[in-house]
Structures are given as structure tokens and as C-alpha cells.
Image: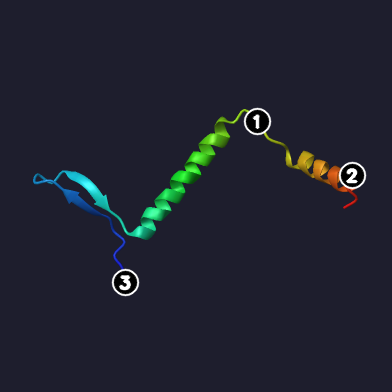
Amino acid sequence: MIDTKAQFITHDEGKRLAVILPIKKYYELLEDEADVALFDEAKHDEDDGLLIDDAFKLIEQERQKNNL
């Protein structure tokens, strides 16, 4: 089994200077960071979005218009 705990590089007095992570954990953290960035972007977007019922109506109108 692979140890998934973080390892720390410290200076002589024990203060943490850097961290070593398993690569899988590193990529998970990158994904989480990207998700947070997308959430923040959407949260600050001035577009209020569209209610689901209105979206379905628009889709149905487009289908009828295009004979789909």
C-alpha cells in the first residue's frame, strides 16, 4: 500500500518550508482549485441564468421551429 500522507521539508528548527504530496493527491488538489475558480466566476457573473422551465420551453420552441 502506498502512503498517501504529506511529507514536509523543514529547516533546522523544524519550521515547514515545503510539502511533498503523492502525485494523485496533487492532481486532485489542482482539480479542486479549478472547480473553485469556476464557481467564483459563475458567482460573480452578472447573468442571472435561466429557470429550468423557461429553458425547456426555449428548447421545445427551437425543436418545433427546426422540425425536430
Are the residues tagged 2 and 3 within 8 Å (C-beta)? Answer: no
Quarter containing the N terminus: bottom left
Residue pictured at 27% horizontal, 55% vertical: 6
> What is the three-letter code of the residue carrying label 2?
Lys
Q: Position of residue 44 (x, y in %)?
A: 55, 30
**Foreground disc of the pair 2, 1:** 2
Kindly state the secondary structure of the residue where label 2 is placed: helix
**Residue 1 in the image: above or below residue 15:** below
Kindly state the secondary structure of the residue where label 1 is placed: loop
* Structural distance between the alpha carbons of marks 3 and 1: 48 Å
Q: Earlier in the sequence, mark 2 or mark 3?
A: 3
Q: Position of residue 34 (x, y in %)?
A: 47, 45
Q: Which mark is residue 1?
A: 3
Q: Earlier in the sequence, mark 2 or mark 1?
A: 1
**Residue 20 in the image: above or below residue 56:** below
The residue tagged 2 is: 65
Q: Residues within 10 Å of mark 2 (few under 14, many from 20)?
A: few
Q: Residue furthest front?
A: 66
Quarter residue 65 falls in? top right
> What is the three-letter code of the residue carrying label 1?
Asp
Q: Earlier in the sequence, mark 3 or mark 1?
A: 3
Quarter residue 56 falls in? top right
> What is the three-letter code of the residue carrying label 3?
Met
| Colouring scheme applied when the structure was drawn | rainbow
Number of marks in the rendered image: 3
The residue tagged 1 is: 47
